[in-house]
Structure formats: C-alpha cells, structure tokens
Image (spheres, rainbow, N blue to C red):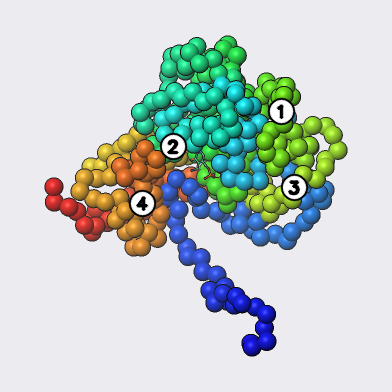
Amino acid sequence: MATSLLRVCPPGELLRPLAVPERLLLGPGPSNVPRRIRAAGAAQLLGHMHPEVLQVMDEIKAGIQYAFQTRNRLSLALSGSGHCAMEAALLNLLERGDTVLVAINGIWGQRAAEIARRLGANVCELLKPPGQYFTPQDIEQGLVQHKPLVLFITHGESSTGVLQPLEGLGELCHRHGCLLLVDAVASLGGAPIFMDQQEIDVLYSGSQKVLNVPPGTAPISFSERAREKLLRRKTKPPSYYLDMSCLANYWGCDGEPRRYHHTAPINSFFSLREGLALLAERGLESSWERHRANCSLLCQGLLGMGLELFKARLPTITTVRVPEGYSWKDITAFLMDKHGVEIAGGLGPTAGKVLRIGLMGCNSTRDNVERVLGALRDALQRCPRSRL
Ligand code: PMP
C-alpha cells in the first residue's frame, strides 16, 4: 500500500500454517510428550495468582518432593530450563569470593564452573577424564585441599553417559563444612536418587527428559542447611528473577501470604504437574526399573551389532563410540531422514566421538529399543564408509 507507514511487511512464512512433523526423540532430550501432558499445556489460561493455579503449584511442590525423595519446604519449579536451575543454585549459594569445588568429567561441570566464575566465585576444579566418575576418595582430597563452601557434581553426565554414585558424598561434604549441589537434569526419574537420605543440599532437574514435559520448567529444592546459607548471605543474590527468597514466597514456601514475583508460565506448570503426576502414578521404583531394563536391552543390541559402548552406566542416555570409518553426522542425519528418529552426536569432550541415544520416560520402551537398533543397522549398511 502506497500510504502505509510500514516499512517491514508481514513475513510470508508466518502467513503459512505452522508445520511440526512427527518425530521419535531418542536423543539426550527433549523426549516426546504424551497426549495427557500436551492436553494440560493446551488448557485455557488462568491468572498466575488465581487459587487454582496456586493449588497446581502446591501439587507440583508435592510432586517434586516425591521425585527428589525430600521433605524440604523450599522445593519449587523455576520458570526456565535446566541451565536456569544451574544458575539459580549457584547464584543463590555463592557470594563473590566464596570457594566452590566443581567436579568436572564432562560438559556440565565445565558449565557450572563457567557460571560460578561469572559470579566472582573462587572456582576450584576437580578433574576426571570423560567417561569416569569420582570416588569418595577423590572428593575428600578435593575438600581437604580447597576447603570449598559448595561442591558441584553431576549425577547423570549426559555428554558422556556416566552415572555418578552419590552414596556417602553428602556426609563427606558436611564433615568438611561444605554443601553438596547435585545436577540431576538427565537422571531424575531414571536412576535412584534420595535427596534427604543422601544429604544433598541443593538438587535440581529439568522438565524435558524423563518427565516428558516440554522444556521450560526446572524443579529445584534446598535443604535446611542450604536455606540457612541463603539467610546468612551478606549480599543479595545478583538476579532478582532467580532470587530464592522471592521465589520461596511466590511458591508459598515461607509461610507468608503469597505475593506476585513474576508472571509464571502457567500452562507449562499445568504440563509439569501432569508429568509429575504420571511419575507418581507409575511409582519411582517402577520407573527406575523400566529405565534400567530398556537401557540394558539397548546395550545388548548395540554390542550385538559390534558397536563399542563408551560408557554404559546412565540408564537414561547411552553413549556409543562412532563406528570406525563412519561420520556421526551421516548416521544421525540418516536416522532422522529415513526413520524419523532423532539420536545425537557427542557434546563437549565427546563431540565427534560418540552417538548418544536417550530412552527417557514414556520413550523408554522395548519397541523404541527395537526401532532405534533397526534404524542403526540400516544406517551402518547404507551410510558411506571411508576405506581405512
Ligand atoms: N545438566 C544436564 C546433566 C543436562 O543433560 C542438561 C541438558 N542436556 C542440562 C544440565 C541443561 O539443561 P537445559 O538444556 O534444559 O538448559
């Protein structure tokens, strides 16, 4: 239109209908979302302070307490992904100059160290080659040497496929005057974790893996010890959005009348409520067993095809070495194009070296194991192989 003031036209691509293909998501996350959870996310909106929404938030808290096996009052879901929980945990626990010991055996420790450095903390690193986990002796040496206030460790290292044993670590940290912070984004619901019994001080996860909820909400919980550290802070946390004292009030964890903090992603909370409800209905023990059984079936199948497992301890994500002569990109692209199945390449220290196959929540089934093995077999026959 000659008279229009607009210099930028409505984009043609937005005038076409949204296209979302069907795909089986067997990478390290996100995983597929069952109908019931999708329906919850598509419900009509309510206000973020309406009693029905506050009730859903209370139900989410109870669901997190069950999934984490904790009675911590300060348990809630952040409005953000796993990284948001990682930032929230570190920026609430640490003040400038505080010493944090970060156990690094893959990308998630590296990320935590990077975040802690940005917060001005004194970051000490405890290193293990990718594919290995930390023993209590490793941890104790680090605690004695660096005298940290916080230890960060990853339960399910999704970049390498390693499950970190947590037994005894909480007690060890507490004996050395340190708080234990655990990342369970890739493991929650798929491998046993007991926040209270294992004396974990801060535990967080994400919505888009075993819980089968779209990304964007992140369960987190603080022990009494961790809560006391927050109360003793000399300075306010550097983020208002992620300040646990404000969030504790909005989530009804501090016994005060709830006040508006931010407009929560209400429909994402509906979905998270349903993801936690499905886990409660199935039961944690049955969920752990299902992940263990299907992962071991997958590992047997991979070994049967002559493939080499990189590390086979994490029941949610299996890492397998890229077979010699093949390009990981060819294999992942082939699975996506010809079979509608997503698997992923490596990440961080495993980039270019492994393929990562996730079987999480409703995706952890015998059928999916057979489907991904069949697709891989096809890929190994049909993808180009360099002559060595
Ligand atoms: N920690 C671990 C162990 C993860 O696997 C992931 C996601 N792959 C994250 C943290 C980060 O979560 P998000 O991508 O949801 O921010």
Q: Which residue is mark 2?
A: 107
* Amino acid at the residue labelled 4: Val
Residue 347 placement (x, y as % from top left): 39, 43
Q: Earlier in the sequence, mark 2 or mark 4?
A: 2
State the residue at coordinates (79%, 32%): 254
- Image quadrant in which you'd find residue 1: bottom right
The residue mark sitting in front, 4 or 3, is 3
Residue located 36% across and 47% down the image = 345
Mark 2 or mark 1: name the one nearer the start of the chain.
2
Identify the residue position indicated by label 4 in the image.
372
Residue located 64% across and 27% down the image: 95
Q: Give the Cα distance between marks 4 and 3.
A: 42 Å
In the rendered image, the residue lying farthest to the right is: 257
CB-based contact (under 8 Å), mark 4 and mark 3: no
Which residue is under mark 1? 235
Cα gap from disc 2 to disc 4, whole angstroms: 25 Å
Residue 352 quadrant: top left
- Decide which of tag 1 and tag 3 comes sooner along the chain: 1
Task: Kindly identify the amino acid type of the residue bearing the numbered disc 2.
Answer: Ile
Q: Nearer the viewer, mark 2 or mark 1?
A: 1
Closer to us: 364 or 355: 355
Which is more toward the observer, 94 or 208? 94
Given residues 232 and 380, the one toward you in this image is 232
Dot 4: few (<14), some (14–19), or many (≥20) neighbours within 10 Å?
many
Q: Which residue is mark 3?
A: 262
> Disc 1 marks which amino acid?
Thr
User: Is 267 on the left-hand or right-hand side of 304?
Assistant: right
* Left or right, residue 356 beside residue 192: left
Residue at 60 percent across and 23 percent down: it is 97
Query: How many discs mark residues in the rendered view?
Result: 4
